[in-house]
Image (cartoon, helix red, strand yellow):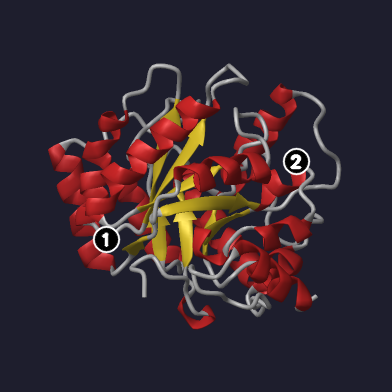
């Protein structure tokens, strides 16, 4: 069995994504997650300097040691680290310090997304993604390619194309429930993604309308996501069409943070998530990685 094999449903954990509390340091994130009842955290070890992001260097030696102490004290796990960005001039080797620490703290995945401006750079995206997977392999991490609706890769199919073309054993696709909605992905498309490429999911809710501008999408994604159950996202339908995966709650909401504070906001995220889909289970028939794509899709579609 591959070291990156898919989970059983009993093993799924809930992680607190750093974007939910982007002003907290990685160390603070661990203690808040522990008090709020999470199993794990998803810290940002590669900052991108979005508004309100914490200022401390997460790779500073003292910060890393304090982070490890927090993990040991609380028993919190690390699900994934973020955020590796593909830009026009990126050197994948620049991700290695974060990957090394990720390996030391037991992280399972690194999140990656593409932010180039050209629509004709497929080969470049494949090359950078492939190199990053190769760098992550010795540290035991998969590289989860995300498709934010306002980024270079805006759809599930576009992200899947890059991952398939790279053909790395530690490749993966990160599904975010908000971006499924904003990109108008039919839930049936999830069945076209091989089970071995799906390891985790970002959780948040939203109202039915879709912003018609990039600025509107960014504002929603970074400042106004809703608790699961407050909007209209079909969490049960998504989870049923995926293999068993881990859940990372990525739910930034500026208003809720101001009203409730970090810890209570994090706690409510988790409570709403468990109340909304805590009993949902995958209905996908898991396949081995050697099965052909056509046979896998035929068997999985039969479930529905």
Real-space Cα separation, disc 1 to disc 2, in angstroms: 32 Å
Residue closer to the observer: 51 or 213: 213
Give me the residue at 58% from left, 66% from top.
292
Q: Position of residue 269 (x, y in %)?
A: 59, 59
Residue that mark 1 sits on: 106
Seen from the viewer's position, the closer of residues 166 and 104 is 166
* Quadrant the C terminus occupies: bottom right
Residue 297 horizontal/vertical position (percent) = 69, 67
Which quadrant of the rendered structure holds the N terminus? bottom left
302 and 265: which one is in front? 302
Quarter of the figure with residue 222: top right
Classify residue 272 as left or right of residue 141.
right
Q: Position of residue 124 (x, y in %)?
A: 46, 25
Residue neighbourhood size for the residue with mark 1, other residues' Cα within 10 Å, grouped as few (<14), some (14–19), many (≥20): some
Q: Position of residue 213 (x, y in %)?
A: 77, 24
Q: Which mark is residue 182?
A: 2
Q: Secondary structure at mark 2?
A: helix
Count the marks: 2
Q: Is residue 279 above or below residue 77?
A: below
């Amino acid at each position: 069995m591959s070291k990156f094999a898919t989970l059983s449903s009993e093993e799924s954990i809930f992680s607190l994504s750093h974007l939910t509390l982007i002003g907290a340091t990685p160390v603070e994130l661990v203690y808040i997650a522990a008090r709020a009842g999470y199993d794990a955290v998803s810290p940002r070890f590669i900052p991108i300097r979005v508004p309100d992001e914490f200022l401390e260097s997460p790779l500073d030696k003292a910060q890393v040691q304090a982070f490890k102490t927090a993990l040991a004290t609380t028993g919190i796990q690390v699900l994934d680290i973020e955020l590796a960005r593909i830009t026009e001039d990126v050197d994948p080797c620049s991700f290695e310090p974060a990957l090394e620490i990720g390996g030391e703290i037991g992280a399972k995945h690194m999140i990656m997304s593409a932010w180039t401006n050209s629509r004709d750079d497929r080969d470049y995206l494949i090359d950078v993604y492939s190199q990053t997977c190769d760098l992550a392999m010795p540290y035991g991490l998969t590289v989860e390619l995300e498709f934010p609706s306002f980024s270079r890769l805006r759809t599930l199919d576009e992200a899947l194309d890059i991952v398939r073309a790279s053909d790395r054993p530690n490749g993966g696709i990160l599904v975010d429930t908000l971006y499924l909605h904003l990109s108008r992905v039919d839930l049936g498309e999830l069945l076209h993604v091989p089970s071995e490429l799906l390891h985790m999911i970002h959780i948040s809710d939203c109202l039915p309308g879709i912003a018609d501008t990039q600025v509107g999408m960014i504002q929603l994604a970074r400042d106004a996501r809703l608790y699961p159950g407050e909007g209209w996202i079909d969490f049960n339908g998504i989870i049923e069409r995926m293999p068993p995966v881990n859940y990372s709650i990525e739910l930034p909401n500026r208003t809720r943070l101001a009203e409730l504070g970090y810890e209570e906001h994090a706690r409510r995220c988790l409570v709403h998530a468990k109340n909304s889909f805590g009993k949902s289970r995958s209905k996908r028939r898991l396949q081995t990685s050697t099965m052909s794509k056509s046979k896998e899709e035929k068997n999985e579609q039969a479930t529905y």
